[in-house]
Image (tube, rainbow, N blue to C red):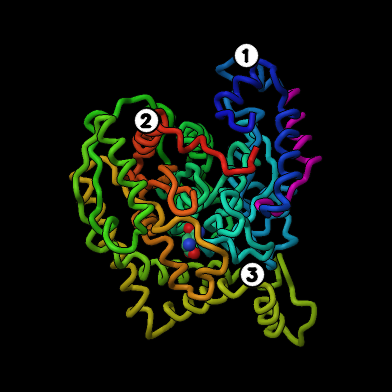
Amino acid sequence: MINASLKQLAAALAEKRISAVELATLFLDRIERLNPALNAFITIDREKTLAQARAVDVSGKLGAGDTAQRSLLAGIPLAHKDIFCTEGWRTTCGSKMLANFVSPYDAHVVEKLAAAGMVTLGKLNMDEFAMGSSNETSYFGAVKNPWDRARVPGGSSGGSAAAIAARLAPAVTGTDTGGSIRQPAALCGLTGLKPTYGVVSRYGMIAFASSLDQAGPMAKSAEDCALLLTAMAGFDSRDSTSLERPAEDYSRELEKPLSGLKIGLPKEFFGEGMEPDVRAAVDAALAEYRKLGATTVEVSLPNSALSVPAYYVIAPAEASSNLSRFDGVRYGYRAPEYSDLADMYSKTRAQGFGAEVKRRILIGSYVLSHGYYDAYYLQAQKIRRLIAADFSAAFGECDVIMGPTAPSVAFAFGAKSADPVQMYLSDIYTISTNLAGLPGMSLPCGFGQGGLPVGLQIIGRWFDEARMLNAAHQYQRVTDWHTRLPEGVQ
Ligand code: GLN
């Protein structure tokens, strides 16, 4: 059961080989047994989960008959990154600031997946306010990589990635502002997808950098991600950047052969910086794609070296504004002792936020301040434009772009935490996608140093998720990297 695809789980539920309650119990028991060593979950609530599963069992949402009415995902458990507001559950965003916050409403994503009958297993650990690439900034402690517990799972959706890798959940949600779905997916050996900006509503998703944040699915395979994305996507008037487009079935192109697919390989992604073991696995994956009938062509993204510096102006600028709402007045943490209102604000924020969040707020306030706005913020916005234009030009020559997801396999705890710039470079291949608003995904393509997973990144044209998923699925039909389990996970 733990290795079953979502389709296989759906069949087992429909044929009454297992009930939603039994399936939820199976995963809850695994969480109880394996989570203490991994710290992937911040909150679990057996009663709530089982009540939701019971409701699905009796609702008639399951059952072989009436397939038109039945959601394929009904009765399948999933866990949410703790950035999504979930009514009645704690939503901490990995921060002391929200350690006791219980949301009075559901995020759009949570609402949609619950409407499809999916059962919430719990809330997943993450870097504080989704700022990080290693999950070491969480107030609730670091998450361990199930492939090697001395190493990071990646971030900021590290709890999400570890939960899939250790089979604590068959599906999870994540968010990706600069790589937080794809990089942990790569480091933990799973498949994750960041949709085109605006495809999934940000309503109820705690804001980090609003013009970059996008939610997406993480699971064992592209086939599973396609099903989840179909359920998550959709217009929502409560998010002003949500796009009003016809509903899509993201599974519709999965089975298309790849003959004729043109893969662009940006020369900037294959230069210095990528570790040799990552390079070997990515090269082997590209050879596999050629066998499947695809052709490769070199393309160029000349401004990609500027993506990390531009991102670390734009993302902190937006974060400094978004995080001003955490002031101890309306919700979340409030300093227990203070002299007056200004002192209350300052003590609350000094005590409630961790070091990385404070660093971003300081950088963001600085680049937005009078006198520096033109030099930094405006300049970064111009670079953002150039990066999007680079992609437009590259897509004139290819259908999808491929390359590494991350420059190295999972690194050891502490290896980069003393040097923020080193940490920021973990997202060197993923950040440009967010700046351009493009869809991107990561899928396992082999193992590198220490037997640790390597991720292949696929970047699609705007709204070309179905084709990206097609390319990923066809590869997963002829390879088995995505089915491998870390030692000790059973
Ligand atoms: N690692 C990047 C950062 O720290 C991206 C985070 C994310 O995508 N949420 O900002």
Task: Label 1, secondary structure: give it.
Answer: loop
The reply, left or right, for residue 55 in relation to residue 392 is right
Please report the residue visible at 44 percent of the width from the left and 59 percent of the height from the top: 178
The reply, left or right, for residue 135 in relation to residue 267 is right
Task: Label 2, secondary structure: give it.
Answer: helix
Tags 2 and 1 in contact by the CB under 8 Å rule?
no
| Number of residues whose C-alpha sits closer than 10 Å to that of mark 1, classed few (under 14), some (14–19) or many (20 or more) | some
Distance from disc 2 to disc 1, alpha carbons, whole Å, reads: 28 Å
Which secondary structure is most common in the magenta stretch? helix
- Residue with the most extreme bottom position: 339
Does 444 sit above or below residue 138?
above
Residue 64, numbered circle: 1
The reply, left or right, for residue 12 in relation to residue 220 is right
Q: Write down the region rendered in magenta.
A: 40-58
Please report the residue visible at 49 percent of the width from the left and 55 percent of the height from the top: 180
Select label 3 or label 1 by which is in front.
1
Amino acid under label 1?
Ala
Residue corresponding to mark 3: 326
Amino acid under label 2?
Gln
| Number of residues whose C-alpha sits closer than 10 Å to that of mark 3, classed few (under 14), some (14–19) or many (20 or more) | some
Distance from disc 3 to disc 1, alpha carbons, whole Å, reads: 48 Å
Q: Is residue 363 magenta?
A: no
Task: Label 3, secondary structure: give it.
Answer: loop
Amino acid under label 3?
Phe
Distance from disc 2 to disc 3, alpha carbons, whole Å, reads: 45 Å
Return the x and y of residue 207 as percentages of the image width and height.
54, 60
Please report the residue visible at 41 percent of the width from the left and 56 percent of the height from the top: 406
Return the x and y of residue 375 as percentages of the image width and height.
33, 80
Tags 2 and 3 in contact by the CB under 8 Å rule?
no
Residue corresponding to mark 2: 474
Return the x and y of residue 34 as percentages of the image width and height.
71, 46
